[in-house]
Amino acid sequence: AQGQLRASGEMFLALCFAFLWHDVVATITTHPQSDCFFYGGRWKHIDGARPAAKSDWTCSDLQFAVHVTADGASAGHVLLPLYLKAPRVRLNVTFRDAYAGNLYENASVTVVGPWFTLGSADDPYVVWVPVPSAALPSVGLSTLTVVSVQKLTTAEPFGAGIGARLLPASTVDFFGLGDAESTFHVTYTPPPIKARATSIRRYIAIGASDTAGYCVDGNFPSTPVLTGWEYVNCGMAYAHVLARDHFYPMALTVLGISGIGVMQNSAAQQSWQMGTVPMPGYFPRAIQSDPSSVWEFAAEVQPDLVTVSLGGNDYNHQKGLMPTNASFTRHYVAFLGELFTKYPTNRTSVVAVCGMGDPLETQADPDNNRCRPCAHVEMAVETFKTAQPQSRLHYIFVPCDGSVVTGTDDIGCDGHKNRIGQAKVAEFLAPRLAEIMDW
């Protein structure tokens, strides 16, 4: 099995040959349980003869720092071997100056995993990651660069129904790092964020396709059928844009599933498409596609902010069979109660978000109006606040009238926002969240 290379920036064009997936396993010298790694999002750590870190939630990431010293060489290269398995997964690798905090220009590479994985489940591939030349030191000096490997795609890119039955989940299994191939002296160290793991801002974004970044990299009117997972990009969805561009540094967890609802999923009458389990059923899982996996909330550092962007799929694509206001309120309030039960401290604020549509979406699909559920969401929020006035619960409405998303240059494939549209939503949310959180 051999993946594909997608590189952004001219600096990587000459190194395309280095970005290959191999079936040959060399020596893993830094295992996934090493203190060198910081894991963002939900991961399951597996012990045994071949330890691994496993995740299928979109936007989950791992970070480590690379210390490079130029003892004598005045020029050279650094190639980092990552050992992993990632079928039907897009991974984005970025490089950031650990001291200044800025991303190196054009230092972002997207790797597309193979459609199918051959061989034993315990056999990883090696991906050789070139460190950008801007991150390499001059003679007698050293640099410290933070490397982030982020999963852009969802666990079940063809839906949680028949698609999940036909194909295994799109999961990242990370087995560790090998020794770098370099003309410099290279060591791995913990990233700076690890030292501030308990004090750094933490954000959990819960939602459906807009939160997961569905079709962000698609172009209208391209279809997402069959190859749609190659258009998913959580790294350019509003939640990650908020964490990266507005509130950095921030630890982000995204629980985003395309087509998901609070009480029923999109096209509920055709449950073979999206399955019958709504978001409250996925929320306790460590691995999205594994109902037996349980997330250890007691071991989790409490988040500062939780946003909930749900309701659109409960009311859209349902051929008129929408929930009553009473039934929707009951389910939404119950889910809010679950969030405050799992995150009971005064540190956590929950913000319900609704809208994000454009004025042209109903022309393309009369059964799709992202603002349709908003009155119901707002009523559910008010119902909860009336019952629990002390709760740190808020509501933000993102208009669908064209003042945020226009429906012209900001739409990707399948009627969903592209990078421009997602950035507009983040720009709208940022000052309102900052006011709520006093950031």
Image (cartoon, rainbow, N blue to C red):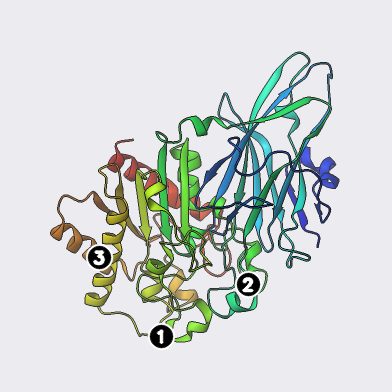
Q: Using the image as rendered, state which of residue 132 and residue 141 is in the foreground.
A: 141
Residue occupied by mark 3 = 333
Q: Amino acid at mark 3?
A: Val
Q: In the picture, residue 12 is in which quadrant?
A: top right
In this rendering, position of residue 170 left or right of residue 199: right
Q: Using the image as rendered, state which of residue 264 and residue 286 is in the foreground.
A: 286
Task: Give the numbered dot on residue 288.
Answer: none
Residue at 55% in and 58% down = 418
Q: Residues within 10 Å of mark 1 (few under 14, many from 20)?
A: few
N-terminal label among 2 and 3: 2
Residue at 66% in and 56% down = 90
Residue occupied by mark 1 = 319
Q: In the picture, residue 386 is in which quadrant?
A: bottom left
Q: Amino acid at mark 2?
A: Thr
Residue occupied by mark 2 = 223
Residue 276 in view in this figure:
yes
Q: Residues within 10 Å of mark 2 (few under 14, many from 20)?
A: some
Mark toward the viewer: 1 or 3 = 3
Say whether marks 1 and 2 touch (CB < 8 Å).
no
Residue 369 in view in this figure:
no
x, y percent for residue 324: 26, 79
N-terminal label among 1 and 3: 1
In this rendering, position of residue 12 left or right of residue 359: right
x, y percent for residue 224: 62, 70
